[in-house]
Image (tube, rainbow, N blue to C red):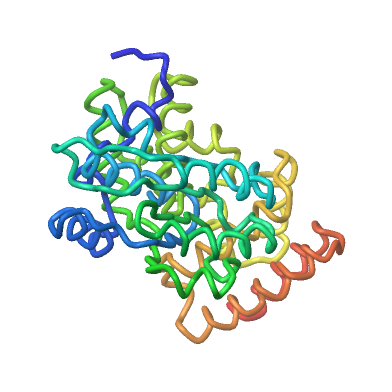
Amino acid sequence: MSSALPWIEKYRPQKLKDVVGNEEIISKLYKIKELGGNLPNMILSGTPGIGKTTSVYCLMNELLEPSIQKDAVLELNASDDRGIDVIRDQIKSFAQKKLTFSKDSIGKHKVVILDEADSMTVGAQQALRRTMEIYSNTTRFVFACNQSNKIIEPLQSRCSILKFNRLQDKDILKRLLYIIEQENVKYDNTGLEAIIFTADGDMRQAVNNLQSCWLGFQYVNDENVYKIVDSPHPLIITKILKTKGLNEQLDILNIELFDKGFNAIDVITIFFRIVKGFDLQEITEPMKLEILKLIGLYHLRILQGCNSNLQMFGLISEINKIMN
């Protein structure tokens, strides 16, 4: 199959039943439909790529007929349209607009969807308070954001807050296998494991990496995936941890990572995930806690601008002392 659309758009769910992960939240959205479509004001919070905005649009598809959605739904990306003028002009005029809903529509409210709402200025958020109250009979507001604590408390108190979690590996795998089947993608299991590892719970990232790897190499395996995402291979990090001698460890770090262009932030991020998540026989639970504490300390130093490579050499040296 071929299409001009990127796969993240081509395979974006259109109905709530197609959304994977966060089953409890999706069931709550189903309840809104079952109870007559009386949509509350909502705040959807969580990390990027886990289905917040997609879930809202799926709910709109369940509640509103396609013929009326264009007039009944106003979408604004608050990272662009973030000032008080947007509230006064676009949102207020939309809320004032009269609209007749078709008999087939379950929902009977106009809906304002504010994506990246945590980017809105405090003044714009303050201006929304009164608008939400005045037009509460006809208009509902849905805020999608990464951090709900950046939404002012007066708005939070007017909304139902739904916190989305990172997607589990099995949820991402299920969607990837569906896309692979539709697009006739050639792959092996190491490729899927690499995509899931690098996505870290982000479905958008996983689908983008799958498409990029397939278009770039015509075969999805771990080596090709790590080339596409330009990330250190976890096996190299594991190899460093399993090597006994400090000089040998530093040689691996230099030759297989730094000489290939990876920086200290890339390396230390994978270090943390390997030590935290992988079951390495060489690392006992008390050792793991000590190493994680060290990684956090050195990560902070690197972010503060200290000589990155030197900090990584120091980290490897400290880890070597703990493990030997």
Which of the two residues, 241 or 193, is positioned nearer the viewer here? 193
**Residue 120 x, y percent position in the rendering:** 64, 55
Q: Please provide percent x and percent y for residue 82.
A: 66, 49
Looking at the rendered image, the quarter that the N terminus falls into is top left
> In terms of depth relative to the viewer, which is nearer, 85 or 255?
85
Residue drawn where x is 21% and y is 58% of the image = 32
| Residue 324 seen by the camera | no
Which residue occupies 35% across, 58% down? 137
The C terminus: image quadrant: bottom right
- Say whether residue 191 is visible: yes
**Exactly how many numbered labels are in the figure?**
0
The residue at 68%/47% (across/down) is 85
Q: Position of residue 306 (x, y in %)?
A: 86, 64
Whole-percent x and y of residue 251? 71, 53
**As drawn, is 265 to the left or to the right of 29?**
right
Q: Of 84 and 322, which appears nearest the observer?
A: 84
Image quarter for residue 142?
bottom left
Please, is residue 142 above or below residue 257 in the view?
below
Q: Relative to 244, is 4 on the left or the right?
A: left
Considering only vertical position in the picture, is 30 above or below 63?
A: below
Q: Which residue is at 25% across, 36% downward?
A: 177
Vertical comparison of 178 with 55: above or below: above
Nearer the observer, 302 or 248: 302
293 sits to left or right of 217: right
- Judge left or right: residue 309 versus residue 137: right
